[in-house]
Image (cartoon, helix red, strand yellow):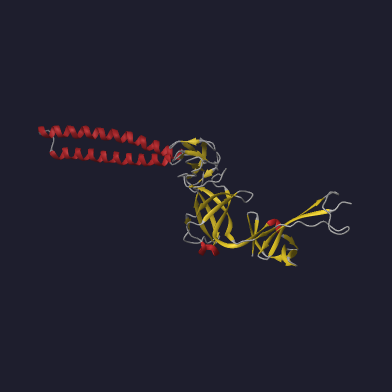
C-alpha cells in the first residue's frame, strides 16, 4: 500500500510561522515510514521568519500616450473634399498638399478681379501719358497749369485704384489657398478621417502629423496623460514615481510625474497628471492606452508569499506555526491581506 507524502514549507513571524504551500505527491513503498504501525509519514517543515520591508503604497490607472510633436490638421475653410493627395503613413514635407476643397466660387472671383486689374492698368498707363504730355505743354505755355494739375490728379486716382484692386487680388488669393490643405511640418501622416465628397468645416480634424518616429531609448516628445480621481489630488506632487506595466502587470519602465493640473476637470472629476517619458516602454504608439502605477509612498510592512495564503468563502487563511512542547505545530488562522506586490500579499 502506497502512502501520500506531504512536503511543506512555511513562513515564521516571530514565534509564529505562515505555511506558504502544501504540495501533495504520491510515493511508492520506498517512502519514509512513520513511527508506529501503519502511521502516516513524518512531515518535513521549513520555517522562514517574516521581516518588515518597504512596501509601495500605490494606485493603478489607465494613461494615454501623447506626442508633444504631433500636429492636428484642420481646414481653414468650409467646403466639399474634391481630392486627397496622401495616404495614412506617408511622409510629407512642409507645404506638401494633403487635401483639396472645392473652391470654384473663390477662383471665379479671383479671375474677375484679375481681369479688372488689366483694364485698370491700361487706364493708369493712359493717365501717366496724359500727365507727362501736360507737364511738357505747360512749360511751353500751350496748356494752363490747372489742366496739368488735373492730369496729375487723374493719374494719382487711377494709380490708387489699381493698388486697391491689387490688394483685393492678394486677399482673394489667400482665400483660395485656404481651400488647399497643406502640411505645416514634416512628419508622418496619421489616419485620414475624411473621404472625397464629404463636407468639412473649420472644426473638422482631417488627420495628424507626427514629426518624429517612435522607438529607441530617448522617447523624445512623448508623455503619458493620467486622469487621477479628485480625492487623491492632495497626494499629487511632482517627482512621484510612475511605473509602466505590461499585460501581466510587470514593471517595464519607470518615469516621474512632471505636471499636475491646477484644477479639476469638471465632467470627469479627475486631475490631469503628465509624465514625460525618459524611459520608454517597448512597443508603444501615440494615443495608446497603457497601465500605469503611481507610487505614493514606501512604508515598512509585512508581506507573505501568495502561495502561503488560501481563500475560503471570501476569507483568507494561512497556516501559522505555533509553539508546542518545545517545537511548533501548524494551525490555520484567518488573516487580512491587501494588494499583491510581485509574488507577495501585503499583510494588513
Q: Nearer the viewer, residue 66 or 204?
A: 66
Residue at horizontal 47 percent and vertical 47 percent from the top: 68
Q: Nearer the viewer, residue 35 or 45?
A: 35
Instruction: Give the position of the C terminus as an image quadrant.
Output: bottom right
Residue 119: tell me if it is visible.
yes
Residue 250 to residue 89: above or below: below
Please give left or right for residue 151 compared with residue 53 in the image.
left
Residue 266 locus on image (x, y percent): 52, 62
Residue 85 locus on image (x, y percent): 51, 35
Count of labels shown? 0
Residue 177 locus on image (x, y percent): 42, 39
Residue 67 to residue 110: above or below: below
Image quadrant assignment for residue 185: top left
Q: Nearer the viewer, residue 214 or 43?
A: 43
Residue 73 locus on image (x, y percent): 48, 44
Please give left or right for residue 38 compared with residue 66 in the image.
right
Residue 101: tell me if it is visible.
no
Image quadrant assignment for residue 157: top left
Residue at horizontal 54 percent and vertical 37 percent from the top: 89
Please give left or right for residue 159 compared with residue 280 in the image.
left
Amino acid at each position: 500500500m502506497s502512502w501520500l507524502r506531504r512536503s511543506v514549507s512555511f513562513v515564521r513571524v516571530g514565534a509564529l510561522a505562515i505555511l506558504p504551500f502544501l504540495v501533495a505527491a504520491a510515493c511508492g513503498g520506498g517512502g519514509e515510514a512513520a513511527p508506529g504501525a501503519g502511521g502516516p509519514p513524518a512531515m518535513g517543515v521549513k520555517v522562514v521568519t517574516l521581516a518588515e520591508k518597504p512596501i509601495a503604497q500605490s494606485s493603478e490607472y489607465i494613461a494615454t500616450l501623447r506626442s508633444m510633436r504631433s500636429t492636428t490638421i484642420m481646414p481653414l475653410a468650409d467646403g466639399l473634399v474634391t481630392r486627397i493627395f496622401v495616404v495614412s503613413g506617408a511622409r510629407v514635407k512642409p507645404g506638401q498638399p494633403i487635401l483639396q476643397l472645392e473652391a470654384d466660387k473663390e477662383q471665379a472671383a479671383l479671375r474677375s478681379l484679375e481681369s479688372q486689374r488689366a483694364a485698370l492698368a491700361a487706364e493708369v498707363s493712359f493717365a501717366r501719358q496724359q500727365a507727362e504730355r501736360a507737364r511738357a505743354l505747360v512749360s511751353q505755355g500751350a496748356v494752363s497749369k490747372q489742366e496739368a494739375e488735373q492730369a496729375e490728379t487723374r493719374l494719382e486716382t487711377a494709380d490708387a485704384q489699381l493698388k486697391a484692386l491689387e490688394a483685393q487680388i492678394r486677399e482673394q488669393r489667400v482665400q483660395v489657398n485656404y481651400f488647399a490643405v497643406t502640411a505645416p511640418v514634416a512628419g508622418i501622416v496619421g489616419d485620414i478621417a475624411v473621404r472625397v465628397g464629404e463636407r468639412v468645416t473649420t472644426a473638422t480634424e482631417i488627420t495628424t502629423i507626427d514629426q518624429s518616429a517612435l522607438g529607441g531609448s530617448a522617447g523624445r516628445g512623448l508623455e503619458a496623460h493620467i486622469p487621477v480621481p479628485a480625492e487623491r489630488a492632495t497626494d499629487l506632487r511632482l517627482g512621484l514615481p510612475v511605473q509602466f506595466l505590461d499585460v501581466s502587470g510587470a514593471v517595464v519602465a519607470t518615469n516621474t510625474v512632471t505636471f499636475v493640473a491646477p484644477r479639476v476637470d469638471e465632467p470627469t472629476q479627475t486631475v490631469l497628471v503628465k509624465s514625460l517619458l525618459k524611459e520608454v516602454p517597448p512597443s508603444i504608439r501615440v494615443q495608446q492606452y497603457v497601465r500605469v502605477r503611481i507610487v505614493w509612498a514606501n512604508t515598512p510592512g509585512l508581506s507573505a508569499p501568495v502561495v502561503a495564503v488560501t481563500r475560503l468563502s471570501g476569507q483568507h487563511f494561512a497556516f501559522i506555526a505555533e509553539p508546542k512542547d518545545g517545537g511548533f505545530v501548524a494551525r490555520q488562522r484567518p488573516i487580512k491581506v491587501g494588494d499583491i506586490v510581485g509574488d507577495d500579499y501585503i499583510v494588513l
